Amino acid sequence: MGLKKNPNLMLKKIFIKTFGCQMNEYDSNRIFDTVKKIGFEKTDKYEDANCYILNTCHIRDKAKEKVYHEIGRVKKIFRSKKKPIVIVAGCVAQAENQEILKREPYIDIIIGPQSYHKINETIERYIKKKKKEEETEFDTISKFNYLSKIKNQDSKVSSFLTIQEGCDKFCHFCVVPYTRGPEYSRPFNQIINEAKEIVQSGAKEIILLGQNVNAYSYRDENRKFRLSDILIELENFSELERIRYTTSHPKDMTDDLINVYKKSIKLMPLVHLPVQSGSNKILKLMNRKHTIEEYLLIYEKLKKINPNIEFSSDFIVGYPEENDDDFSQTIKLIEKVKFTNSYSFIFSPRPGTVAAGHELVDKKKSKERLEKIQKKLFENQLNKNKSLEGKILKVLVENQMKDGIKLFGRTEYMTPVIFDGSFDYIGKIIKLEIKSSNQNSLFGIIKENYKKKVA
């Protein structure tokens, strides 16, 4: 029989430009899966689109202005063509809603991240009535119940899977509680069923996502499930090679989760655990709910289980009231833990947050601190990559690069690896000898004995 589609929407094309975090990438993928039901198909050519979606992020500075800049670009692209339906989705849509519609008449629909299950009816209603639409209610349960009935057809080698959304931590610098709502954990069976769909579509690695992924907590009539239970269940998927999760909060790094590292083979040895600052004074001002001592205890527990576990993190410099001593404590922490693959930013006030009204640290001083912290983090990464030269590493091959010759994969620590090889290696874990490196990537060659084995 097949799926009944609205004849007015047959052969229409949709283009989504995604900003920001991995969860936005997951959301964009699920939007694609959803709009197929009303006759849309995905296009990678924005100029062919009948519907143009901007899936936005509100975490960093000037997020709102990026939206208007992008809409200006879309206007130019479609100046001599029929205007597409223009939708602003994601966290900027949630935070700004009506203001965006008033400021930019070219935008037709605003839809927040907890309303994606309503996107089909919203589009159809707009086509019928040509009346601007806004959907920004927090309705997370309905959203995931709806999406659970639509197959996740993500066919990437490494695929995202959202298990938890929202945040109850209310860090004083963060807009997530206001744009994604309170913490919500998806039903355990719903997650496992979606994981099966992803693996059946060809995924060899699953990255579990959540604003506070390790705060995952779901109770059915029989028992309570934590992140550790999901990891243990995924370990049994024979076709799945690697498991990761992000982003974690130190407060929720419980012993049951730490102990999974003792027995899991598929859980990768890179822990992304944002610390934000090395100063307890600043952590308290941020309302982070953890101390450096508690953070280091987690570090020591994991290192005791497996000395090869590495840590990556996020750092905010120039937070209100940060002085030279506070900053020096952050540098000391970086020197001790030797973080890799980390992110660092100058504090950027987000409207509506507690820290937004606080006096800023001198801009010049903040820039100097950022340069220092990034130099230290980049040195760590450069030294780590240099130490891998001459070694043989297991690499999951994800795709072919744009040159059509070289392949791209990642190590167990998420480090990109570039090498020559055939399309046949995509989706396989292969052994590579690392010949050279730079700050961001490794460059290797396939070991001959492995090549013969695959052939």
Image (cartoon, rainbow, N blue to C red):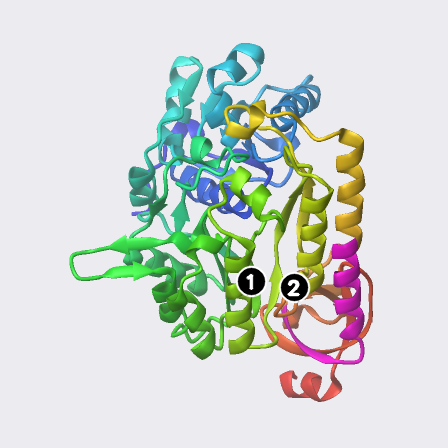
Residue 155 in sight from this viewpoint: no
Q: Which of these two is toward me, 53 or 431?
A: 431
Task: Give residue 395's quadrant in the image.
Answer: bottom right
| Residue underneath mark 2 | 337
Residue 336 in the magenta stretch? The answer is: no
Q: Position of residue 226 (x, y in %)?
A: 34, 60
Element at label 2:
helix
Q: CA separation, marks 2 and 1?
A: 8 Å
Q: Which of these two is toward me, 287 or 81?
A: 287
Q: Which of these two is toward me, 404 or 254?
A: 254
In the image, which residues are magenta? 376-396
The residue lying at 38 percent from left, 17 percent from top is: 128
Q: Viewed as shown, does residue 363 lie left or right of 280?
A: right
* Mark 1 closeness class: few <14, some 14–19, many ≥20 residues within 10 Å: some
| Residue underneath mark 1 | 296
The residue lying at 81 percent from left, 40 percent from top is: 368
Question: Residue reaching furthest left?
Answer: 221
Q: Position of residue 402 (x, y in %)?
A: 75, 54
Check contact, mark 2 vs mark 1: CB within 8 A. yes
**Which amino acid type is marked by label 1?**
Leu
Would you place residue 403 above or below residue 95 in this image?
Answer: below
| Foreground tag (2 vs 1) | 1
* Mark 2 closeness class: few <14, some 14–19, many ≥20 residues within 10 Å: some
Would you place residue 71 above or below residue 413 in this image?
Answer: above
Residue 379 in the magenta stretch? The answer is: yes
Would you place residue 189 above or below residue 20 in this image?
Answer: below
The image quadrant where one finds the C terminus is bottom right
Q: Viewed as shown, does residue 72 lie left or right of 207?
A: right
Q: Viewed as shown, does residue 411 lie left or right of 293?
A: right
Q: Position of residue 369 (x, y in %)?
A: 76, 42
Would you place residue 420 above or below residue 320 in this image?
Answer: below
Nearer-N-terminus badge (2/1): 1
